[in-house]
Structures are given as structure tokens and as C-alpha cells.
Amino acid sequence: MPISWSVDAKRHVILVKWHGIVTAGDLGNYFKTMLTDASARAICRCIADLRGAEIQLSGGDVQAVIRDVVRPLLGGRTWTSAIVADDAVAFGTSRQYEAYSQGFNRSAIFDDEVQALTWLLNDAASGPADP
């Protein structure tokens, strides 16, 4: 699977890694799987590492996945995302995600995984911020 994830229970963080070719179908399947997992829903914060992935997503793809999959599955909950991007495509996709997820997602984009994790742990130390 081009997007894999695991729960780091000790740090209360979901670790996400993109690799290989990533399409809209992959992104939708990832969110469907992760957002229906009870342990992931209890955490509501992730670090997503997009470095090295070949991203084949348009802005419309990102918008559709958020509209049709993410928002309905979150059901009003909020989310915090630290995104690690190392090239223009990954950064652009991350910015699109930020734009389309306004209202439920607090995020920041980094080029360094340690900085991303530090921000995530400090910014969201209190856990999920439900409305």
C-alpha cells in the first residue's frame, strides 16, 4: 500500500509514510482505513512523511477526498497534522490539503522530520481538540 500508518501509543501520534506512486484512490483508501480505526480516532494527530513518494494527485483529487471521505468520517472532530515534504510537488499537495481541510485541521509543513514531530508534540500536547 502506498500510504502506510501505525500508532505510536507512547507518544500518542499516528505515524504516516507515503512511498511509491500515490493516487487519489490510495489517499481515499488510507483515510477510510485510518479514520475508521478506533485507536487512530482517539489520537487525532499525525505526522505524515511524504518524502520520496511520487505524488499523482490534483488539487481536485485532494478536495474530493476531503469532502467525500475525510469530513464525513471525522464527524465534526478536529485533527492536527505535521507534514514532512521534500520537493515542490509534495509541498504543493500539502498546501492543498491545508487549504481544503480548513475548519477541522490544524497543520504545518516541514522539511525535517524531527522539527515536524517536535511541533506536533508541543502544539497538540493536550490531545485532540474536539469542538
Image (spheres, rainbow, N blue to C red):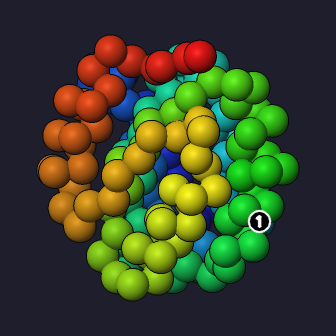
* Residue lying at 56% horizontally and 17% vertically, measured from the top left: 130
**Image quarter of the N terminus:** bottom right
Work out whether residue 87 can be spotted.
yes
Q: x, y percentage for residue 103?
A: 60, 39
Q: Is 23 placed left or right of 116 in the picture?
A: right
Q: Is residue 117 above or below residue 65?
A: above
Q: x, y percentage for residue 49?
A: 37, 59
Q: Is residue 41 above or below residue 34?
A: above
Q: Is 129 placed left or right of 27 in the picture?
A: left
Q: Quadrant of residue 55?
A: bottom right
* Residue lying at 70% horizontally and 30% vertically, measured from the top left: 74
Q: Is residue 47 above or below residue 65?
A: above
| Neighbourhood count class around disc 1 (C-alpha, 10 Å): few under 14, some 14–19, many 20 upward | few
Residue annotated with mark 1: 25
Q: Is 51 placed left or right of 23 in the picture?
A: left
* Residue lying at 46% horizontally and 82% vertically, measured from the top left: 89
Give the camera-side residue of 17 and 127: 127
Work out whether residue 36 can be spotted.
no
Q: x, y percentage for residue 84?
A: 32, 61
Q: Quadrant of residue 113?
A: bottom left
Q: Secondary structure at mark 1?
A: helix
Q: Is residue 29 above or below residue 86?
A: above
Q: How many marks?
A: 1
Q: x, y percentage for residue 8?
A: 35, 29
* Residue lying at 32% horizontally and 26% vertically, measured from the top left: 124
For badge 1, the amino acid type reads Gly
**Image quarter of the C terminus:** top right
